[in-house]
Amino acid sequence: MTRKHIVFKGSVQGVGFRWRAQSAAHLYGCTGWVSNSYDGSVVMEVQGSDDDIDCMLQTLENGTFISIEDMEIKTVPVIDERGFSIE
């Protein structure tokens, strides 16, 4: 089990990114949250197996209208949580 803090930059607001992230998280059994930032980026913390997180990120990268230009990823401590929320 791992947890990643990810900042997405590019065309990631106003394109259904957060809803797609929530759907992909449910599909791959990941937990966490996703939120728009004031600077136009999207911030997400996602927790699951490395393979499930990779599959989730691939689903986001293949999303219609979504254009991820950069991802800043760092590993953070795993926490006890359930579900994946849009904040």
Image (spheres, rainbow, N blue to C red):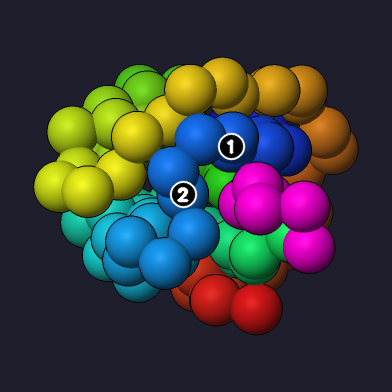
Magenta-span inclusion, residue 39: yes
Query: What's the amino acid at mark 1?
Result: Phe
- Residue at far right of view: 77
Quadrant containing the C terminus is: bottom right
Query: What's the amino acid at mark 2?
Result: Val
On the image, numbered disc 1 is attached to which residue? 8
Q: Vertically, is 52 above or below 21?
A: above
> Which residue is at the front of the view, 12 or 47?
12
Q: Residue at x 49, y 59 (%)?
A: 13
Q: Is residue 28 visible?
A: no
Magenta-colored span:
38-45
Q: Residue at x 74, y 60 (%)?
A: 37
Per the rendering, the mark at residue 12 is: 2
For the residues bearing labels 2 and 1, Cβ distance under 8 angstroms = yes
In which image quadrant can residue 75 be found? top right
Across and down, in percent, residue 41 comes to: 65, 47
Magenta-span inclusion, residue 4: no
Across and down, in percent, residue 35 comes to: 65, 66
